Image: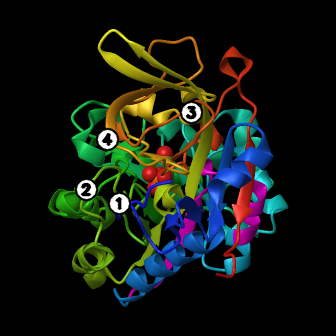
Amino acid sequence: MSRQAPRWWQRDDLQYTQGELTLAGHALRPLALAAGGPAYFYNAERVRTKLRGLRDALASTGLRNRVFYAIKANRFTPLISFIRSTGLAGIDACSPQELQFALSCGFEESDISYTATSVSNADLDILARHPGALINCDSLSTIRRLGERCPGRDIGLRINPGMGLGYGDNALLQYSGAQTTKFGIYREHLDEALALATEHGLKVRRIHFHVGIGYLNRQLPHWEKILETCGEFIDAVPDVQSVNIGGGLGLPHVEGDEPLDLNAWAAVIKRQFGPRKLEVCVEPGDYIVKDSGVLVLQTNTVEHKRDTDFIGIDGGFNLAVEPAFYGLPCEPAVCTPRSGATRKVTIAGNINEALDIWARDVMLPPVEEGDYIAFLNAGGYASAMASNHCMRGQFYERLLYPKAP
Ligand SMILES: Cc1ncc(COP(=O)(O)O)c(C=O)c1O
């Protein structure tokens, strides 16, 4: 086994120790071996650290603030119960099922912010039975139909500032922008939305927006312009008490990605919303859980085909769709690296689809059939979006707590 030079992603809780990749002090290869198939591991303390960092940054704005964890990113029950036990965050839910699941994990209605799209009457009937949940309406239709069911209720409006951003300026990751999207109420419809709310006795207390996912430091100037534009919506709505700036906080995916500086991020919030003295809410998913998790898969095929050295593994894009769908890389790290020169390989999954490639032309130490590879940044939108495509949807999940050294 080789000694590994420090990697760009290495941290105290994710590193090589005596030739073994460890997470929270646990060697991953033996854990994966015991799991007997595709396995996700999450470090609970990493999640707490991220939540604390966010709360501290928000506190530095001097504004009242709340964090709602976007449960869509990862709904593994032990993880959700852990987040509940930290007391550092509520839940952002986007379906009645997510809302009810959060309640079953011990969250109160008032801990739950609810922002959904294409909302059905059946959904609204369920929401009407949860008067304490903080509902943000993202269309005129939802305002009207919610108003018919719950006149007098406090609501939020999800707005669409017509500007967006996302990791690497990837248009697929933007929720608002040049292209018209389904999300939120545009400026030209705001007056109509407010009139509808008044007609149904709804009181608009919150403005909500979520403009894209994965933004990093270099995008903060553009993000500040977006907040400025959203401020114009806020000023057009009397009696707003709270602004929810959505999720989308990113984290590095490849070497050279500059991490988000939370102090700089909080300074933007303070500049834009400080003078308005609003409560600031944020609802990140990825930022809280993504880098806490890895997906460990076993190599089953090592073979040269034409000009390419392929490594075939026992899990496909159905277990972590972001690399295939969005081009968002999951960095591969061999669990127990062998000594020898690194070489360029392409890692492919076990699904019969041309897009089932984990990583193309990446440098890895020598890999043999049977070796384990951990894919980093698999804590968010991986297990939660997994499908049973090709009937290969089985996986194991475990929340790890730090192991004494
Ligand atoms: C309304 C809303 N809020 C929050 C999030 C969480 O985003 P992220 O995990 O990128 O922070 C999403 C993601 O789709 C969303 O649609």
Q: Are marks 4 and 2 in contact (CB under 8 Å)?
A: no
Which mark is first along the chain, 1 or 3? 1
Q: Amino acid type of disc 3?
A: Ser
Question: Dividing the picture into quarters, in which one does residue 363 lie?
Answer: top left
Residue holding disc 4: 176
Residue holding disc 1: 7
In magenta segment, residue 72: yes
Q: Magenta residues, as a range?
A: 63-82
Question: Dividing the picture into quarters, in which one does residue 61 lie?
Answer: bottom left
Closest to the camera, between mark 2 and mark 1, is 1
| Separation of residues labelled 3 and 1 (CA atoms) | 43 Å
Q: Amino acid type of disc 4?
A: Ser
Question: Dividing the picture into quarters, in which one does residue 401 lie?
Answer: bottom right
Closest to the camera, between mark 3 and mark 2, is 2
Say whether residue 216 is left or right of residue 195: left
- Location of residue 171 with respect to 196 vertically, above or below: above
Query: Which secondary structure lies at badge 3?
Result: loop
| Separation of residues labelled 3 and 4 (CA atoms) | 16 Å
Name the spot of residue 252 as percent of width and height, x first.
Answer: 34, 56
